[in-house]
Image (cartoon, rainbow, N blue to C red):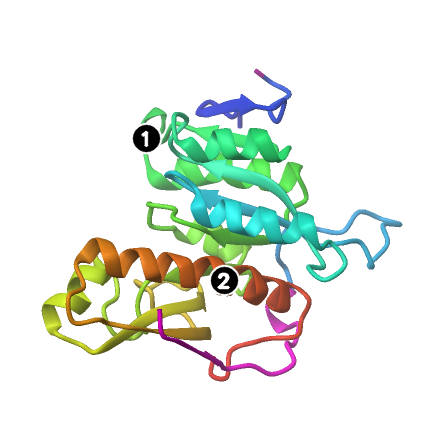
């Protein structure tokens, strides 16, 4: 299958503030890795650093936080941000990737007849780049079984609420409308549902009396930038897994 919706960036296509951290974790097992991509090439060392693809659609502040952490302390963050996948070629996150020296693969979903066909081309690119983990960082598309079946248990997302409260879109507005006194962020594995995957870590953000959606969102984003890179690193290293699966 040709990568008909792929736009190569950086040469990636040869064809064309109160906060409380709560972490649920134990030593990760390997049960999700069977029969999944990418396959190790014959003779390749099993000690190679895990390769991570970050999926993003917008400005990319969480992408930037991930890249900054993993590039600044490669020994501590035992993996490499090896690829950006973006479904909006004009998004600012593409510029962030270029500045950071991270290859970017930009796709145009409208060029495909279905979401599944779009993800089949994305999957080809992931296999080409030997990607081990997918990290969603402001990726504004629902993931289909095409990617879920290939990366089950190896796809991570961050959501701006304390799940299971306020899943889906506009989570910050949902929290304010409901009148909660605390909200926060949740890092979780991705499954077939809407923000229903097993929880990896959570961090509380207090709701202040005069908060607006903008002021609360700013503190939530700051919490994401702090928590997300460290949780991704721990999961990729096999040091953290959900307390319930």
Residue 70 makes an appearance in the image: yes
Give the residue at x 86% y 54%: 45
Residue at disc 2, secondary structure: helix
Above or below — where is 231 with respect to 100? below
Residue 148 x/y as whole percent:
46, 56
Extent of the magenta region: 16-33
Above or below — where is 71 with respect to 59? below
On screen, residue 65 versus residue 171, left or right, reads right
Give the residue at x 34% y 62%: 220
Foreground: disc 2 or disc 1: 2
Residue behind mark 2: 226
Q: Residue furthest top?
A: 16
Sequence-wise, which precedes: disc 2 or disc 1? 1
Residue 193 x/y as whole percent:
32, 64
Q: Nearer the viewer, residue 139 or 197?
A: 139
Q: Nearer the viewer, residue 32 or 211?
A: 211
Which label was assigned to residue 113?
Answer: 1
Residue 38 makes an appearance in the image: no
Mark 2 Cα shell of 10 Å, populated few (<14), some (14-19), many (≥20): some
Residue 194 x/y as whole percent:
30, 62
Q: Nearer the viewer, residue 168 or 193?
A: 168
Labels 2 & 1 near each other (Cβ < 8 A): no
On screen, residue 225 versus residue 75, left or right, reads left
Q: Is residue 145 magenta?
A: no
On screen, residue 111 versus residue 78, left or right, reads left
């Amino acid at each position: 299958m040709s990568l008909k919706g792929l736009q190569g960036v950086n040469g990636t296509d040869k064809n064309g503030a109160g906060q409380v951290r709560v972490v649920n974790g134990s030593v990760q097992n390997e049960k999700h890795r069977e029969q999944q991509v990418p396959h190790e090439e014959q003779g390749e060392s099993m000690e190679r650093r895990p390769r991570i693809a970050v999926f993003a659609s917008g400005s990319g502040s969480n992408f930037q936080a991930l890249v900054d952490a993993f590039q600044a302390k490669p020994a501590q963050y035992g993996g490499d941000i090896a690829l950006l996948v973006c479904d909006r070629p004009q998004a600012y996150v593409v510029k962030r990737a270029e500045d950071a020296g991270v290859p970017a693969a930009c796709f145009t979903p409208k060029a495909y007849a279905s979401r599944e066909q779009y993800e089949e081309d994305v999957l080809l690119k992931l296999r080409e780049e030997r990607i081990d983990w997918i990290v969603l960082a402001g990726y504004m598309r629902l993931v289909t079984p095409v990617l879920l079946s290939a990366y089950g248990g190896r796809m991570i997302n961050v959501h701006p609420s304390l799940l299971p409260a306020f899943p889906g879109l506009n989570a910050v507005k949902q929290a304010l409308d409901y009148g909660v006194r605390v909200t926060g962020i949740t890092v979780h594995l991705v499954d077939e549902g809407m923000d229903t995957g097993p929880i990896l870590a959570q961090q509380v953000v207090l709701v202040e009396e005069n908060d607006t959606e903008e002021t609360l969102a700013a503190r939530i984003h700051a919490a994401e930038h702090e928590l997300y890179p460290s949780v991704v690193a721990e999961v990729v290293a096999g040091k953290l897994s959900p307390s319930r699966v």
